[in-house]
Amino acid sequence: MESKKLIIAIDGYSSCGKSTLAQELANSLNYIFIDSGAMYRAVTLYCLRKGWVNGNFLDKESIIKSLDQIQLDFSQDDNGVKVILLNSENCEQEIRKSYVAAVVSKIAEIKEVREKLVEEQQRMGERGGIVMDGRDIGTVVFPNADIKLFLTATIEVRVERRLLELQNKGIETTKEEVRENLIQRDLIDSNRKESPLKRAEDAIVLDNSLLRREEQLQWALEQVQIRKSNPT
């Protein structure tokens, strides 16, 4: 008899390797990986294109009114890589650029945006067998998740990881720009009124500053085995 398919929530700070771990863990378990961060970035891209967010300017009313016009889906590109679709457009590369990262936290602060995306995320995961990463997965989206992991790392390590990720994608930036962006996102994410970034009380914490990807994945797989061996 096939064992119950779990809901696994992974939260943590920007550039802590949440998406990397979530995707590798989902692949190892033959689960579905849902990148909640990509969903917020896609909404942000839509708002940027409409001119509703720019620097300190934020047309919150227009954003809220347009939410029913935003359709998000996940698909695979020609190489089998999972990508996010914004109204049927593959925007995976565009949402990773620094100009989107610079304002995504402002969009994520909007209550109505979070409500829309949380509803979508809960729908995607209602049957279990998913790994989802973000900042409020274990506290808001799936407070009853079977496994909750919370990742952290030093700011120095996070800057290097983010810089390398952007360079590998051909996106030009500087270490100083990356550091400033991460610091600002931490501040906004941790202090926003709607669903702030915080560790769920029953989350298992991992500081992965000194861990290789393989070691991090092995640790997560061990947590899954422990949970399956001790169902509640």
Image (cartoon, grey):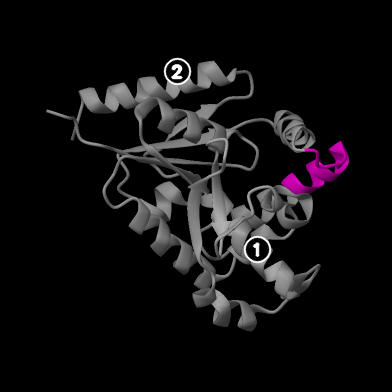
Q: How many marks?
A: 2
Give, as a three-letter code, the residue at label 2. Gln
Residue 197 at least partly seen: no
Where disc 1 sits, the SS reads helix
Percent coordinates x, y for residue 19 in the rendering: 55, 38
Q: Which residues are magenta?
A: 170-183
2 or 1: mark nearer the eye:
1
**Is 74 left or right of 167, judged from the image as shown?**
left
Residue 177: say if magenta: yes
Q: Is residue 24 visible?
A: yes
Q: Residue at x 29, y 22 (%)?
A: 226
Cα gap from disc 2 to disc 1, whole angstroms: 34 Å
Element assignment for label 2: helix
User: Which secondary structure class fits the magenta region best?
Assistant: helix
Residue 105 in the image: state x and y as whole percent: 65, 59
Q: Up-down: is 23 above or below 145?
A: above
Say whether residue 210 is left or right of residue 183: left
Q: In percent of the image, x 51 and y 21: which residue is there?
A: 216
For mark 1, what is the residue?
Answer: 44
Identified by mark 1, the residue type is Thr
Residue at the limit of the structure toward the front, as seen here: 78
Q: Which residue is the site of mark 2?
A: 218
Q: Nearer the viewer, residue 156 or 65?
A: 65
Residue drawn at x 71%, y 74% as measured from the top left: 50
In x, y percent, where is residue 130? 36, 41
As for residue 182 lying within the magenta part, the answer is yes
Q: Which residue does the image show at 18% across and 35% down from the upper left?
A: 232
